Amino acid sequence: MRALLCFLLFFTVARIDAQPWNGKKCAVVITYDDALDQHLDNAAPLLDSLGLKASFYVTAFSNSVQKRMNEWKNLDKKGHELGNHTLFHPCVGGKGREWVKPEYDMRSYTVQQMIDETRMTNLFLHALDGKTKRTFAYTCGDMKIGDSGFIHAMKNDFVAARAVRNQMHKINEIDLYNVDCYMVNNHSAEEMIEWVKKAVATNSLLVILFHGVGGGNGLDVSLSAHRQFLTYLKQNEKDILVAPMVEVAAHIKSFQK
């Protein structure tokens, strides 16, 4: 009897370790940063045609949001997440980042200023979708004001926060307030699909970060590569959990408990 119980325990643990993603082999979260027109024109229609859901990290004061607010609001109605990407998209400026405007250079921000900006964006997004649970994406991957991290003071505001590093992890290894991702920078569909195959092989979470989709940002993906990649995800849904970050984060939190 004892041997049987040990076998059943080993079998159960092995199954959980192999398929921790609601019975699937890995999870893929598709994210789009900065609230660009191309997300509305090129990304969302393709996602909807395939029945895939993504997280759109909205910079609330972007030109696209100002001009097309109702269209951004409609993304929530299609099942996508409107994530928080700050109000003005501040980043740490300096050498190599001359494009950062002085007024939005995080070197001149205070921690409280960063907290206020993200909370204002949460308030704006709540006005659009009525949601209270949301995730955050660090702008430019910058996590500190000077030497001080700011996410700790905002953990009650978000269920997770996405960073920018080309890494993937198993479900028990994930730090929900420092979630790694693979950033697309003119990668081919074949290169992105290889990331997915690695996630499947290692039972990991793969977060994909898109900026431009057929234009709109120097960090771009071609329309054909974007379509081929999303089509691959759809064709392999039996092995891949594809969902917005807010849903995947809730699953991770429940599993880790």
Image (tube, rainbow, N blue to C red):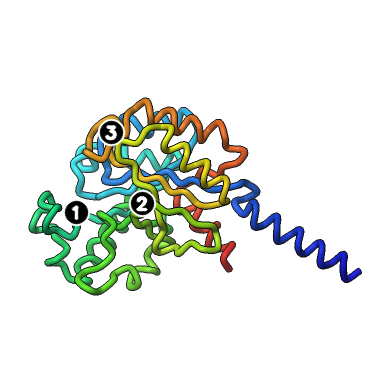
For label 1, the residue is: 88
Residue 136 located left or right of residue 195: left
For label 3, the residue is: 38
Residue at disc 3, secondary structure:
helix
**Type of amino acid at the residue the image marks with label 2:** Gly
Q: Residue at x 9, y 58 (%)?
A: 103
Q: Quadrant of residue 17?
A: bottom right
User: Whole-percent x and y of residue 163?
Assistant: 35, 57
Q: Which mark is residue 114?
A: none
Q: Residue at x 55, y 57 (%)?
A: 251
**Residue extending furthest top?**
224
**Type of amino acid at the residue the image marks with label 3:** Gln
> Is disc 1 in contact with disc 3, using a CB cutoff of under 8 Å?
no
Vertical position of residue 225 compared to residue 125: above or below: above
Q: Quadrant of the N terminus?
A: bottom right
For label 2, the residue is: 83
Q: Tell which circle, 1 or 3, labels the residue nearer the N-terminal end.
A: 3
User: Whole-percent x and y of residue 19?
Assistant: 64, 51
User: Whole-percent x and y of residue 224?
Assistant: 37, 25
Q: Tell which circle, 1 or 2, labels the residue nearer the N-terminal end.
A: 2
